[in-house]
Amino acid sequence: MENFRKRPKGEFMIQADWDQLYLLTKHWESDLKFFRDDLQFLNKLIDKYFIWIDNDTSINEVSRLRSELQEIRSRCEDLLHKTQKHREQLGVMIEKDSDDSRIFRLEHEHLENEITDFVKSFRKNRIDIFKITEYLKDTEDFSGIK
């Protein structure tokens, strides 16, 4: 599958200085805020079409996607909180000029893996939502939608 990581390949996690890791977490936070906004758009998109569905199969599929979307939104908020907290800890380590980085770097890598898994889930759900809304648009009667 695609590589969604923002860091350079190789030994970056071990060799990166605090400023580089801090910048990387800023990128994560920015991306997560974008995803949070996009999740609001996807939710509005589902709401727009959901009320017009009269087919049980479509209702079940859209309900499933809506539930997944809610779970992804919750994960996004959780990751945003974790990223902000992680960045704050990193700021403290920069100020103290700490050399004890092994545990922090492991946590950093773990957070990066969580964000990568989130991005994969988000993109899959987004594609599924676009597919179902396209299908609904083509098969349901939306003459009343403006």
Image (spheres, helix red, strand yellow):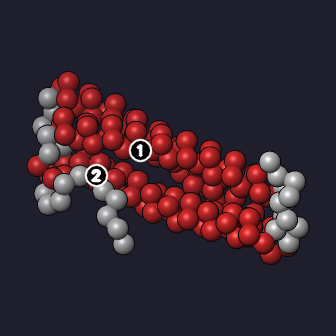
Q: Residue furthest bottom?
A: 57
Eyeballing the image, is 50 above or below 87? Answer: below
Question: Where does label 1 land, which residue?
Answer: 31
The residues bearing labels 2 and 1 have C-alpha atoms spaced at a distance of 10 Å
- Vertical comparison of 47 with 86: above or below: below
Quarter of the image with the N terminus in it:
bottom left
Percent of width and height locating residue 115: 41, 53
* Kind of element beneath mark 1: helix
Task: Work out whether residue 49 or residue 67 is closer to the camera in this orientation and state it.
Answer: 49
Q: Does label 2 or label 1 sit earlier along the sequence?
A: 2
Does the image show residue 119?
A: yes
Q: Determine the residue positioned at 80% across, 48% down.
A: 146
Callout 2–callout 1 Cβ contact below 8 Å: yes
The image quadrant that residue 71 belongs to is: bottom right
Frontmost residue, 24 versus 37: 37
Whole-percent x and y of residue 3?
31, 64
Residue type beneath disc 2: Lys
> In the displayed structure, does residue 145 sit left or right of residue 128?
right
Q: Badge 2 is on which residue?
A: 6
User: Where's residue 44, x and y in %?
Assistant: 69, 47
Q: Quadrant of residue 141?
A: bottom right
- Position in image of residue 139 (x %, y %): 78, 72
Q: Within 10 Å of the Cα at label 1, are there few (<14), some (14-19), or many (20+) other Cα atoms?
A: some
Question: Given the image, on which type of amino acid does mark 1 rest?
Answer: Asp
Quick check: 142 left or right of 10?
Answer: right
Mark 2 Cα within 10 Å, few/some/many (few <14, many 20+)? Answer: few
| Secondary element type, mark 2 | loop
Q: Please tell me which residue lies in front, 82 or 132.
A: 132
- What residue do we see at 56% from left, 65% from top? 127
Residue displayed at 57% across by 55% down = 72
